[in-house]
Image (tube, helix red, strand yellow):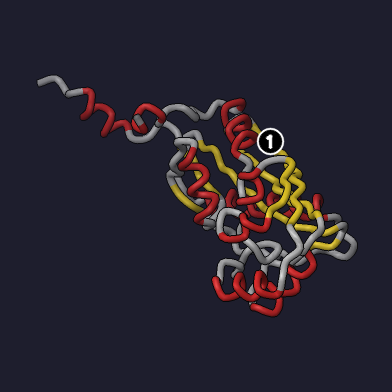
Amino acid sequence: MDATPEAIGATQGPTTRFVLASGSPRRLALLQQIGIEPDSLLPADIDETPRKAEPPRELARRLARTKLAAAEAALHHQDQKIPTWLLAADTVVAVGRRVLPKAEGPDEAADCLRLLSGRPHRVFTAICLLSPNGRRERIVETRVRFKRLSGRDIQGYLASGEWRGKAGGYAIQGLAGAFVVKLVGSYSAVVGLPLYETMSLLDGEGYPVRAGWGSLA
């Protein structure tokens, strides 16, 4: 009896593999928004401390490269015969040359919010891609300006808990979206992954970015 196409596909297994070197639910959701479902997640536990006098742009680039390298090393223990695309990213929020932390406590978040109040800041998101054809990277800079925050704004936002673990002490896709007076650049990059640049890199490196679009209809 001849095998059915479904049976043939099942025995052949996957023909490509996409790995996201991140445990961020925001980055995963952004990829899913454009129809890409990672085959696996490989979050990297790295030291994200800025070096002395390190510019924010270079910090984002270095951290994304470091995450990529850590995930690449982990992949060496897996099947190397499957063509693999590995994506890493990092987002840095800065006021001038000052890098704002990923807020872990309310006092740290409050300091960030007071610094961002009524003034512009920049968000740098670096993406690094390892494909069967080599390595590519992009850095996206987005300029954001907050309204002048009142004490009620800051206290209310701290009570929400949305700031926890977020670069600059805020999540633009949540309540803090109401603080944004102006944004020039990529909204999705501020969330954590610039979708246009990510899709362009993957498409240019031969990943079937539109393969899952038919299932979304």
Q: Residue furthest left?
A: 1
Tell me where residue 20 appears, x and y as whole percent: 53, 47
Q: Which residue shows up at 61% across the image and 55% down it?
A: 177
The answer, for residue 139, to whether it is visible in the render is: no
Give the camera-side residue of 100 and 61. Answer: 100
Label 1 neighbour load within 10 Å: few <14, some 14-19, many 20+: some
Q: Secondary structure at mark 1?
A: strand
Q: Position of residue 6 (x, y in %)?
A: 22, 28
Name the image quarter holding residue 43: bottom right
Image side of residue 150 versus residue 204, left or right: right
In this orientation, which residue lies closer to the viewer: 196 or 40?
Answer: 196
Give the residue displayed 42% in from the left and 28% down from the top. Answer: 211
Asked if residue 70 is positioned above or below residue 46 in the image, the reply reads above
Nearer to me, 93 or 87: 93
Q: Image quadrant of residue 213?
A: top left
Q: Which residue is mark 1?
A: 136
Left or right: where 96 falls relative to 212? right
